[in-house]
Amino acid sequence: MKKPGMLGTFELFLLLWLYSTSTILLALPRIYAQDGQSALWLLPIISYLYLLPFIWVIIKLRDYFPDKILVEIPVILFGRWAGYLVGWPLAFYILFVTAMALREFTDVVNYIILPETPSWALLLPFLIASAYGAYKGPEAISRANVILLPLTLGAFIFLLFSSFTQAELYFLAPILGPGLDELLISAFLRLSVFIEVAILMALYPNIRSGKALRFVAFYGMAFSAFFMALVLLAYGLNFPFANTQLIGSPLFQLVRNINWGRFLQNLESLFVFTTVLMMIIKISLSLYIAVITFAKTIESPFYQPYVFPFAFITYLYTFMPTDYLTAVKWEYEFLRPYGFISLFILASFLLAVAAWRKKKRPRKKRSLKREPTAL
């Protein structure tokens, strides 16, 4: 397979930010409002603290296999059968999670902007654009993300701080919501919200050094958690948490609430445009990761021939949930929690085996050197 290009530290940092933060654009505020109530904005920060062991495992695993992605490591340690056992389920798991996010995004756009347009017509151009990004690879995706940064991060920050003009502080009372103990438990149970950090294990060959990975993993996810907390704080200051569970797209309602007088209102179109750009980049990267995982599993020299077939499979998966709420339930109650647990156990197991074998190898060499002198 062609040697992958390297991603700059800044590019990778921003790519991880967009990939992990884009979940806040869809149904995540509903989930956090249900768990954290008026303290929903504290949950991402607490969850980040729980995430640190997984980040450490991701960093240490690359020290042993800097030029391999996750699915190649079992092959090195155990043989080809282990690669098939891990690679096939992982590739299609990524596709299914991608399809759920795509379904949620399509339904939100369908309900609030284009109610007369059929879902398949909305999905098709969006998925074609995402497939093209996946075909070009992570270098092109990351550079597109940097170029579009003023339109994504810039517009997002503008909309975010604009929403503070309508803030009501009493919506945040009580400050700890259901209580500190409940927050700690809920943050741990929602740790899978940050499963996106696992994409770094599919980008090992594209990362310049272990130092760059440490910076991106620790500080990139910290920035994402802080940004998500800021968005949830803005939302919590504008709406009572009890109403959030009844809203399909909480952030869209937040943007609709912005009013700076006659000359600056009705900013929904800016929000939708920003959301579309962010989701195209996210789906492109998700599709690439699924395809490269599959290509490495079957030892194909190229991943590009599988991009559009996998995009078509994603398109079919998107219609499996009967509605928006079903897609949300599948993603946050099944796919993310069980996927996070599986990835954490797999990565930790591979790291333990790699460390044990490295520790065992020098002992064998020393015993071989002593043997002639004993004779």
Image: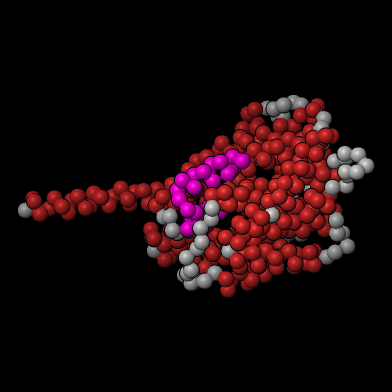
Left or right? Give the position of 78 relative to 233: left
In this rendering, the answer to whether 2 lies above or below 36 is below
Q: Position of residue 70 (x, y in %)?
A: 48, 57
Quarter-wise, where is residue 251 in the image? top right
Quarter-wise, where is residue 177 in the image? top right
Seen at 60% across and 56% down, the residue is 142
Seen at 47% across and 53% down, the residue is 208
Residue 153 shows in this picture: yes
Seen at 48% across and 72% down, the residue is 301
Q: Is residue 219 magenta?
A: yes
Residue lying furthest left: 375
Nearer to me, 348 or 165: 165
Seen at 84% across and 49% down, the residue is 268
Nearer to me, 157 or 60: 157
Q: Position of residue 205 (x, y in %)?
A: 48, 58
Magenta region, residue range: 199-223
Nearer to me, 373 or 125: 125
Residue 282 shows in this picture: no
